[in-house]
Amino acid sequence: MEFKEFTIKWGMVVDLDKCTGCGACMVACQAENNIAPISKYENFDASNKLRTLTWLLVYKMENGKPFPEHEVAYLPRPCMQCEHPACVPVCPVVATDKNEEGGIVSQIYPRCIGCRYCMAACPYHSRYFNWWDPQFPEGMDKTLTPFTSARPRGVVEKCTFCHHRWNAAKERARKEGVDPMNLPQDWYQPACVSACPAGAITFGDFNNAEHTVGELSKSQYSRRLLAKLHLNPQVYYMSKRPWVLAMLDNYRAGDAHGAEGGQHG
Amino acid sequence: MGVNRRRFIMFVAGAVAGTLATPIPFKLADDSSIWTQNWPWIPRLQYGGIAHVPMISKLGAPAPVNVTTAGGRPCAVTGNAKNPLSQGGMGALAPAEVQLRYGPARIKGPLKKAGDSFSPLSWEEAEALLLEKMKAAKGKVAAVCGDETGTAAEVLSGLVAGVGSSAFCLMPGESHVAARAWNRLMQGKGQPGYDLENADCVLAIGADLFESFGTPVRNAKALAASRPAGADSKTTWIYAGPVRTRTAAVCDQYIPVAPGAGAAFALGLAAQLIQMGAAAEAQGFEAFRALVTSAYAPAKIKDATGVAPEAFAALAKTLASAKRPLVVAGSVMGRGGAAADVVAGLCLNLLLGNLGKPGGLRAIPEIAPVVTGGLTRSQMLKADLVDFLMQVDAGKLPAPEVLLVHEANPAYALPEPETLGKALAKVPFKVSFSPFMDETAAMCDLILPNTLSLERFEDLITPYGSSFASYTMAAPVAAPACDAKSTADVVLGLAKTLGVDLGFATFEDVLAARVAALAESGGFMSDTVMPWQAIADGSAPEGGDLAEGLGTGTPWVSVAQAEQGGLTFPVQVLEKALPGTPDAAFPFSLVPLALENVGSAKVATPPSNLTTIRDDELKASSLCLAMCGQTAAKAGVAGGDLVKVASARGEIMALVDIDEAVMPGAVAAPLGLGHTAFDVYSRGKGANVCKVLTVSAEPVTGLPVWDSSKVKIAKS
């Protein structure tokens, strides 16, 4: 399946050598996008990560060595907004698409029939299914942001790079006489990016020479997650630690892809 | 006209063509998909003009943030890019601030204990009851305050002093230990601050810099600035401690140091530096040199610290060759540490000659109180709550007649909760100002719920660890979501009726006086120059419109330093800094980890934070206890085993999690779980690690220490 090329291609470069795994990005994302807390149907237990709903999830990576050589890194995983998304072609109702300037994979909740083919197709586990209607404690629905509608039971949802913030930035650009197709980098930053105290996430347009992400993505320390699948995520990860880079390509001993340490796709 | 086959086919074909041409079926399909998702119980969004209003988040480490409002309704929290303490970032508790306005644990109005439950009463009745009890107490009043950085603490301390009591205690924190070390033992002036932004080599001993120490958001921003993405790092970050913490995970180097051996490690490093020619001019240096070179020579403390002499030598070389080295010592759990640990770290800084220099240790002058009779922070830090409660429990001090608890949850967050709980129970009339039904509020006789930060006037005065003095202020963003009142105003009203003159009628007036006083004291508004730039330049900018700047979330800042006189190396407290001999009954050291996403000493895990807790920290309702394979083998347990973790003072249950990030002999677990109060989102999840924390008296100072408790582990 052929996908469009866009003038603007939003993406992230996450510096894993800065991420402390504090979770501020996750909480900021949940508040911004009206993700309901774990429900009574799950007995308020969020420790089973198969049942939680997190557009952004921070994974813990370990090098597998015993103390004291043991090392830890944290990997924040939003939707990868792949250039060749595996989720889009499998959607029978075009509820998810990659058809808009910016290259953000859309998710149209009212169209979604909940078949979850997209979830099966996504190798990054970035998509989540609403097993239950959203359950906000009494009154807490008054704190919902006006940015993202609350999703009902039976639909799939995922990170949108806080698409509404892009809309707001474009609106600001029009008001201030700036070209909306050439926004300054800091005008549009998703909630997780702005919240991160360690500045681990750089966000911008890969196609804009004035934005730093393009240059960063070409660094010798940058990789894409599971690059060998050729989905070409618009999220890159940087690290100067070889074991971290190798792990990003699902490295196993004897696996030529990881052992070469090269980038694929 | 008859219907023949041809006409029938024409009719069907026409119907199909017509159906395809009309939008009706598509519209119906679209509508049905929309309306089958559009139920009344799915919340509707409310729209309105978007604004970003300054606020101060105090649920975790205090930090300036902004509240996003839609049509005046608070709906999200973002960082405050104008404030050097946060620079647009925020901790994991700050985003929950807005949602917790409607959290299930929020107390809806004043409550009075009635048997085992509470009954509501009006504010007039509640305040009248409090007045009656305060009058009857005749000065036998004590207060516990968890808002160290706010002027509200000054107001409360003024009331306590005004009724003739000296029992005003802040909740234990890193600043207590630092004050004990720097002001009391080393005779230093001002509050110790660390200029991380200008340092080129930072050694953190125990202090979990980017998670819990001092100003974690500012600290993490310093890390971010020192490591421009894709470019070479400007600063070497080194972490030393028994657990590869979140801070250690991003440091350039991790040095495993045995639990409780932080001071010995620092002194071993001092010995190495002295051997390389380092010296300091402070009093007692010769005695210090004699002590560390004899008792803490790296070869001698190898076993006690778990650090090889070669590692000491290499680290000393790294520090000595750095242009602006800095040492930050503290407790991994952010409270309950030994003063000797901090003293040893401060002495290292003196040896490195960085006191008062860019990238070094700085002494931040204190801001004078404005409330009549109010205490300065250094005066507040002299009192020790744990010591006070232990003396009450032991009958050495009389229990107060009235206890006022403000922004604190001592029944949950203090060590040995059973012992200290008995002391609390001795108080006949306990008053909580908590906005949430926490463990302490649940045992109080009267609850006068405070407003949340975004519903009141709030301020933030130089948090501990900051390398510059600062003052940030915020006005209420929204009216209280329930029948709550700002405690500072309640206390001012109470003082007036008691005849105690605090000098002000409202908290807003107090803050106005504070601003007026600051305007006369130099400093500048940090809207164009960041304080670390001024420190690096050696300049002392002045000016800026305080009232206008503070209204937008920009802080008043000063880079002035407290003048020192009589700085001393306190050799006596360092003589017994080696960890104690192993206890066969309790062979493992417990390392409690303060993780902000899990909660704080003040608040339990908010609903939105539950997903951030990893399944190697909490599994279903079981706390996870991290230990390396070697420790597990020694304890005779395996990953997934349910174990009993017991100290001399208490026990908890936990699941074993094999984690090679923990040093052999140590076990680690997060604080902030195991609540018995609050709400369904946090109650009954995991165990409260404080239950097994054991208080011991620090040699020389005799003050309580509880960050390196010994435990035993047995399969359940």
Image (cartoon, coloured by chain):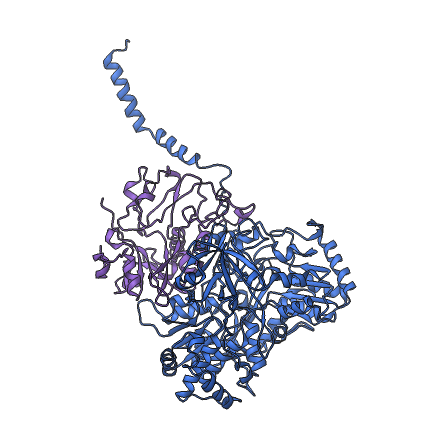
Q: Position of residue B2 (x, y in %)?
A: 28, 9
Residue B291 placement, left or right of B417: left
Q: In the image, which lettered chain appears purple?
A: A
Q: Residue at x 64, y 61 (%)?
A: B421
- Please indicate, yes or no, whether residue B502 appears anywhere in the rendered image: no
Question: From the viewer's perspective, is residue B462 above or below residue A29?
Answer: below
Question: From the viewer's perspective, is residue B29 above or below residue A249?
Answer: above
Residue B171 placement, left or right of A166: right
Q: Quadrant of residue B220?
A: bottom left
Q: Say which of B296 and A236 sits in front.
A: B296
Q: Position of residue B624 (x, y in %)?
A: 47, 56
Residue B606 placement, left or right of B269: right
Q: Residue at x 55, y 62 (%)?
A: B692
- Please indicate, yes or no, whether residue B485 appears anywhere in the rendered image: yes
For the N terminus of chain B, give its image quadrant: top left
Question: From the viewer's perspective, is residue B569 above or below residue B144?
Answer: below
Q: Say which of A100 and A74 sits in front.
A: A74
Q: Say which of A248 and B367 sits in front.
A: A248
Residue A6 placement, left or right of B355: left
Q: Position of residue B168 (x, y in %)?
A: 66, 69
Question: From the viewer's perspective, is residue B563 above or below residue B139?
Answer: below
Q: Residue at x 26, y 53 (%)?
A: A232
Which tint is chain B? blue
